[in-house]
Amino acid sequence: MDPGQEEELRVRRLGDVLWEIPCRGRMRVPGRIYADESLLALGKEDRSLQQVANVAELPGVVGYSLAMPDIHWGYGFPIGGVAAMTADGGVVSPGGVGYDINCGVRLVTTGLLESDVRPRLAGLMQSLYRWVPCGVGSSGGIAKLGDKELRTLCRKGSRWAVDRGYGTAEDLRNTEDQGCLEQADPDCVSPRAVQRGLDQIGTLGSGNHFLEVGIVEKVFDPAVATAFGLEQGQVTLLIHTGSRGFGYQICDDFLKQMVRALPKMGIEQLAFAPLGSGEAGRYLSAMACAANYAWANRQVIMALASRAFEESLGRSRVGLKIRLVYDVSHNIAKMEKHLVAGRELELCVHRKGATRAYGPGHPGLPEAYRSVGQPVLIPGDMGSASFLCVGTLKAMEETFGSTCHGAGRVLSRTQATRQARGRNIAEELARQGIEVLARERKTLAEEMPEAYKDIDRVVEVMHEAGISRKVARIKPIGVIKG
């Protein structure tokens, strides 16, 4: 980026919820932002729109550097950003994935209604809190792994967990990529990352990670909801977490390696490696290990949470009708085939704080969902709602099959903590009928509802744009924060 260029950033309107940053300077493609006017203003305030323009300078980028309505400032790429690079001449950037590799969301349904759970909600939340460790450095969800076992997990992902009794084969079918990226190679993972990964499977982590017991409050598309197994009034569980310290260390290791090579590459904003190079191959193989770790982690957490439901409600998993709807990543880079200007290209699609949203007919979807499209899971803040949406053919045409991933922060954790001073966030939420548990009171301050954008507006933008359509709104009644 040339000196002073940041002040010259222009944004022009293309439609009601679509904006464009025209090419200037070293931008190879335009930037495109999905937002209404108020959400766009927030992107201008925190400099995340400048990051959209920066990403557009990367070698091999095609189409557009994309931003979703939950966009906010991140490391290198904005959070809420999507970019695709050609396999020939493009690059991979750890900053386009993020530190929490394969942070993602898993939606679980039950055969319960709110009336079945509300009288026992406090006990259920305590049971979930006991079964699933949470918070900074949390460990011990299951027995500590040995090095050999961790290597097996890295290669097998969710199947590793299912093979050990944590779930069923149906869970694998209803997980993005069946919970496993095949290019995973544990030899590309540092000893420090291995050490950090040995005892964190089955743990929630800290910050915005959560378990959320919810109620299907409103169904927008009954036919698609039925295909996904949802109905109004149903009790659900959302699991939001990622690859913990294991993925963080992998990202940190490769960022340091790639930053050292930056002077040779002639770009300052982002660290990257050319696709096809040994360094890019090693990163993608290590990243796949972290992705598989995250899928195994959410698979184990689902099994532990099921035991908490059984313990507190006195029924078996079968009796509770616990079922995985879908598990989808929102921090990952993967080789995918997409049409660009009428040509099918193999691309490295970076989704950082963005959710895959494949449309109907895609062969990568479970057969049961192929006729309607991919379930898209968009969690909100702990005081509002989360959404189940569905991917569309328009997403395949415009966003490389991608949509938003959540509400998106509007306050930093420091700002939120300052604004929460003197308040009891747990009591405020309790008055709304939401039972909240957290390892530290500080976490609730950092994650208070006002720290996030309006989830209804964020989801509505993508619905109006035709990228992901609303299927159901899920209100929280119980939340565990990491």
Image (cartoon, rainbow, N blue to C red):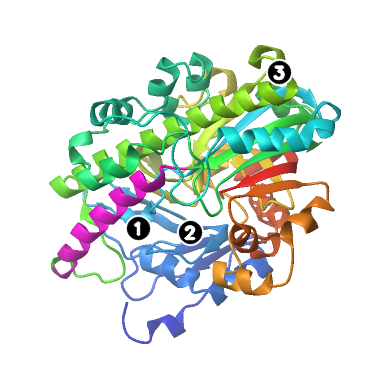
Mark 1: few/some/many CA within 10 Å (<14, 14-19, 20+): many
Query: Which of these two is toward me, 278 or 22?
Result: 278
Residue under numbered circle 1: 95
Disc with the residue nearer the chain's start (3 vs 2):
2
Disc sitting over residue 320 in the figure = 3
The stretch in magenta equals 242-263
Image coords of residue 226 (percent x, y): 72, 23
Magenta stretch contains residue 254? yes
Image coords of residue 157 (percent x, y): 37, 28
Task: Nearest to the eye among marks 3 and 2: give it.
Answer: 3
Residue 252 lies in what quarter of the image? Answer: bottom left
Magenta stretch contains residue 31? no
Q: Residue at x 84, y 53 (%)?
A: 431
Q: Residue at x 69, y 37 (%)?
A: 125
Q: Classify the position of the N terminus by image quarter.
A: bottom left
Q: Is residue 341 visible?
A: no
Query: Which of these two is toward me, 124 or 28?
Result: 124
